[in-house]
Image: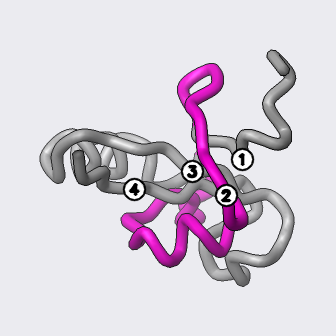
Amino acid sequence: MKKYYAGYNLYGTNVSYKSMGWAVKAFDTVKERDSWVRKHWCNENGNNIAENITYKDARDILGAGNWVEYEGWMINEKYDPRN
């Protein structure tokens, strides 16, 4: 099933996806993703910290391989602490 992704970075979304601080959430529908991004798009200082991202962007953040959900966030399976 197709997933829709949101990127989240406490340092702000104006940094490269290869930079530190990025996390990825996956959603089943565009509506769910867009609702989550609208709720979390900025921090208390007004800095943009969440945005819609593509599958390619998620791959840039998480790396190649299999991804799994861990505590609500997507991680690369090779970093899964449950293994």
Q: Amino acid at mark 4?
A: Tyr
Q: Residues within 10 Å of mark 1 (few under 14, many from 20)?
A: some
The image shows residue 18 at horizontal and vertical percentages of: 78, 77
According to the picture, the residue beneath numbered tag 4 turns out to be: 5
* Residue name at image x 71 percent, y 53 percent: 10
Specify the quadrant that holds the N terminus: top left
Q: Residues within 10 Å of mark 4 (few under 14, many from 20)?
A: many
| Vertical comparison of 46 with 14: above or below | above
Mark earlier in primary sequence (3, 2): 3
Q: Which mark is residue 65?
A: 2
The image shows residue 21 at horizontal and vertical percentages of: 79, 57
Residue 38 counted in the magenta span: no
Mark earlier in primary sequence (2, 4): 4
The span picked out in magenta is 44-73
According to the picture, the residue beneath numbered tag 3 turns out to be: 24
The CA span between labels 3 and 2 is: 15 Å
The CA span between labels 2 and 4 is: 16 Å
Image marks 1 and 2: residues in contact by CB distance under 8 Å: yes
Element under label 1? strand
According to the picture, the residue beneath numbered tag 1 turns out to be: 76
* Residue name at image x 67 percent, y 57 percent: 65
Judging from the image, the colouring scheme is one colour
Q: Amino acid at mark 1?
A: Asn
Mark earlier in primary sequence (1, 3): 3
